[in-house]
Image (cartoon, rainbow, N blue to C red):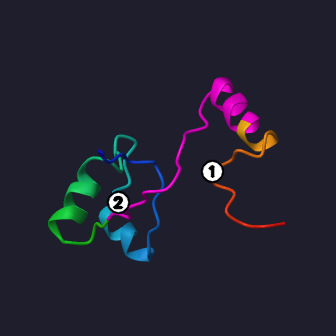
Amino acid sequence: AGRISGGFFACNKKIFNYLVNSDHMMLEEEPMRQLLADNELMIFKHDDFWHPMDTYRDYKLLNNLWNNDQAPWKIWNE
């Protein structure tokens, strides 16, 4: 399976060394390229359930899974 960027970043304060004060700066462009070049960029491989919740359709689908006790992300016992 391929990999995606889920849009979540965990950074320490060194990230600010890679950012410029500009209305045109985009984190996913030059700062990420430089972090990669400096060997400061890593990924977390997550092979369990993942689904976006960007739309009302996603909201309904995920809530339906939850309400029918079929939520694959619920890994705890009550």
- Which of the pair 44/32 is nearer the observer? 44
For the point 34% across and 60% down, the residue is: 19
Q: Is 26 on the left-hand or right-hand side of 48?
A: left
Quadrant location, the C terminus: bottom right
Q: CA distance from mark 2 to mark 1?
A: 37 Å
Kindly indicate the quadrant of the structure image that contains residue 55. top right
Question: Label 2 amino acid?
Answer: Leu
Crowding at dot 1, Cα within 10 Å, few <14 / some 14-19 / many 20+, comes out as: few
The answer to whether 29 is drawn above or below residue 53 in the figure is below
The answer to whether 65 is drawn above or below residue 18 in the figure is above
For the point 67% across and 31% down, the residue is: 61
State the SS at label 1: loop
Span colored in magenta:
43-64
The answer to whether 22 is drawn above or below residue 13 in the figure is above
Quadrant location, the N terminus: top left
Indicate the position of residue 10 as horizontal and vertical percent values: 47, 66
Question: Label 1 amino acid?
Answer: Pro
Indicate the position of residue 46 as horizontal and vertical percent values: 43, 59
Q: Residue furthest top?
A: 57
For the point 15% across and 65% down, the residue is: 37
Which numbered disc, 2 or 1, marks the residue that appears first in the sequence?
2
Q: Which residue is mark 2?
A: 19
Indicate the position of residue 24 as horizontal and vertical percent values: 35, 40
Crowding at dot 2, Cα within 10 Å, few <14 / some 14-19 / many 20+, comes out as: some
The answer to whether 11 is drawn above or below residue 27 in the figure is below
Circles 2, 1 touching at the beta carbon (< 8 Å)? no
Q: Which residue is mark 1?
A: 72
In magenta stretch: residue 69:
no
Q: Residue furthest bottom?
A: 13
Indicate the position of residue 67 as horizontal and vertical percent values: 81, 40
Q: Is 27 on the left-hand or right-hand side of 10?
A: left
